[in-house]
Structure formats: C-alpha cells, structure tokens
C-alpha cells in the first residue's frame, strides 16, 4: 500500500519537475503539507496518469483475485463465489488505502482550511475509477447470483433476449442507492473536490476518506453471510465492529467536522450551520442521509443477530402426547 503512495508521489514529482517551476523542489516537504500557491500548480499530466493507473489497478486486481480463488489448489471456488469474494477483497483494499490516505492527510494539516497535502489530490484522482469499476463488479455479483438461483434459462440453452435487461433492471432496483451513491461520487463529488475547493480544506477531505474504515467489516460480513456463517462468533464480532466503525466514521463524522470548524472559527457547535453557506449544509445533509439509512439497516441486522433465538414450536406428536 505504501508502495502505491510512493508511486503517487513519484508520478507527481516527476511531472511537477517537468514544469520547471522555481520552487518545485520545495513542493513536497517531509510532512507533505504545502503552501497554497505551490499546491495549486499540481500538474495535469500527473493527475491524468494517476487516473489511468486507477483505471488499470482495480480491474486487474479483481481479475487476478478471481483467477487465484478459482485455481488455488486449496480453494477451487466456483465462478459465482470467486466473483463475490474478489469484489469484496478489492473493496477492502480500496478502503484500507483510502482510510490510510485520509489519516495521513488529516493529521498532517494543522490548519484545517489552508494547509494542503499532495496525497489528497493524488488519491482522489486514483480512486475515482474504483467507483466506476465497483458498479460493474456489483452487477457481476448480482448476475451470478441470478444464474445460481436458476433464472438464467436452461443449461446450454439460448438465453431469452430480454434476460440481460431483466437482470440489469433487478440489479438497479436492488442496488439503486449504492449505484446512485457511486454515480454522485464520480459526477459530483470528484469535480467539486478538484475544481470548487481550489486547494482549500484538505483536512476535511482527509476525514471524509477515513469514512472507509467501516468498509472491510461490511465486506467480511457479506462474505460470511454468503457461506451461511451468520451464527458464528466471527460473524458476531465482525458485526459489532461494523456497527461501531460505521457509527463513528460515517454517522458521527459529520458532527465532528462541524465541531472542528467551530473550534477553528471560535464558534459553538450549534452556531456552525448558521455561519457557513447554505449549500455546504445541503451537501453535508445529502451525504449524511444514505449513511443514516445504511446505519439503520446495520442496526436492524444487529438486533436480529444478537436477539435470543426463540425455541421452535412443539411438533404435532408432542402436542398429542
């Protein structure tokens, strides 16, 4: 993972030096923070190259994991299983990288508005293709689940012309919120973070990246459910960690960001929403809304998991006795 971050830095540094700015040698300090005037000159070629690297990295890792899970002598997974597990492993890898990058950025920026870190822009460019890839990976998982359930037509027979469209509609119906979330991340949040911010607020971006801390627990939970391990100790421990990490890193994250800005501006927490532009409050509310919905689903699942199982009803023979 740190090799990837080192690659980010080398790509940006090489492209930055090619611009031959007078102060290019001071752009990357040991702490990673830069002055706004220098950080705003990130080279377009370096950013584009990082985007291309992301377009290659995530699909290639997914394909390699699928191949390994299907061909490893001790695993020999079927294609549907391999696709599901590989997609969750890739999501976990991305989550670990994002949360690590977010931690580095947020702890390096002492001034929450003006301080900048090269990793905030670099990782944003690299991670955008992940959301595009993940939409396709989720569709593959849904497709294979559809096939396993026996809705894909007769074995070896011709597939109905509308079957692919039917599966796609079922996928969009089931995963609409997640697909919408990914589309908004690519089409709205990414342009805003690159253009609208104008190099301000890397601290907040770093904190938002740390929201991915909960993702590996979510992915492990889905894998355990796939293998009918809902009642194991591992599933219960993972469920508790998922609930705690989701609450802290996704739900309580937004009050923390408001509190951090209030501390910076000398305002009490409740006064912050009135002191910042309305569109910022709207954006935070739109980002928080799906997190609250998913947290509700997690809490509902946790209640089912930890609720004492009721004893089965007596059999007819027992009632007759």
Image: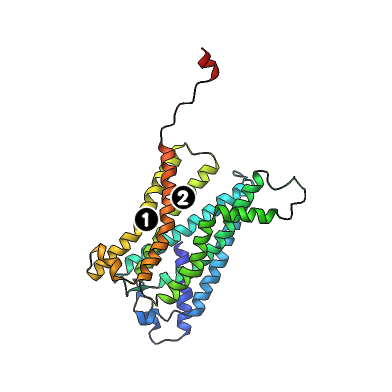
Locate residue 219, reporting x and y percent.
49, 50
Left or right of 317 in this view: 31: left
Closer to the camera, 81 or 183?
183
Locate residue 301, reporting x and y percent.
44, 43
Circle 1 packing at 10 Å, graded few (<14), some (14-19), many (20+), is many
From the viewer's perspective, is residue 204 above or below residue 83?
below
Locate residue 137, reporting x and y percent.
58, 57
What's the residue at 54%, 69% (across, down)? 53
Label 2: element kind: helix
Left or right of 266 in this view: 90: right
What's the residue at 39%, 44% (across, down)? 240
Locate residue 170, reporting x and y percent.
61, 52
Left or right of 91 in this view: 152: right
For residue 218, the mark is: 2
Closer to the camera, 200 or 315?
315
**Residue that mark 1 sits on:** 251
From the viewer's perspective, is residue 77 above or below residue 193?
above
Circle 2 packing at 10 Å, graded few (<14), some (14-19), many (20+), is many
Asked whether residue 71 appears in the rendered view, the answer is no
């Amino acid at each position: 993972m740190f090799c990837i971050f080192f690659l980010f830095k080398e790509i940006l540094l090489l492209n930055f030096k090619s611009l031959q700015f007078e102060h290019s040698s001071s752009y990357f300090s040991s702490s990673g923070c830069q002055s706004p005037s220098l950080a705003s000159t990130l080279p377009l070629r370096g950013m584009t190259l990082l985007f291309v690297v992301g377009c290659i990295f995530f699909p290639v890792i997914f394909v390699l994991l699928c191949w390994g899970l299907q061909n490893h002598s001790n695993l020999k997974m079927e294609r549907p299983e391999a696709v599901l597990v590989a997609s969750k492993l890739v999501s976990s890898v991305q989550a670990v990288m994002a949360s690590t990058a977010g931690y580095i950025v947020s702890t390096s920026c002492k001034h929450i508005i003006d301080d900048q870190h090269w990793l905030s822009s670099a990782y944003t460019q690299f991670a955008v293709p992940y959301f595009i890839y993940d939409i396709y990976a989720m569709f593959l998982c849904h497709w294979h689940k559809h096939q396993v359930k026996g809705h894909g037509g007769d074995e070896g027979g011709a597939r109905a012309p509308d079957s692919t469209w039917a599966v796609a509609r079922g996928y969009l119906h089931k995963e609409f919120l997640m697909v919408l979330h990914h589309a908004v991340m690519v089409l709205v949040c990414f342009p805003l973070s690159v253009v609208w911010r104008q190099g301000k607020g890397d601290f907040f971006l770093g904190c938002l990246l740390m929201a991915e801390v909960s993702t590996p627990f979510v992915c492990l939970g889905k894998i355990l459910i796939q293998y009918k391990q809902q009642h194991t100790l591992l599933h219960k421990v993972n469920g508790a960690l998922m609930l705690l990490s989701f609450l802290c890193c996704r739900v309580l994250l937004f009050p923390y960001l408001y509190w951090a800005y209030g501390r910076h501006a000398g305002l009490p927490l409740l006064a912050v929403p009135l002191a910042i532009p309305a569109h910022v409050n709207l954006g935070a509310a739109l980002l928080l809304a799906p997190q609250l919905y998913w947290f509700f689903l997690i809490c509902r699942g946790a209640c089912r998991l930890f609720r004492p199982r009721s004893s089965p009803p007596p059999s007819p023979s027992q009632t007759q006795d």
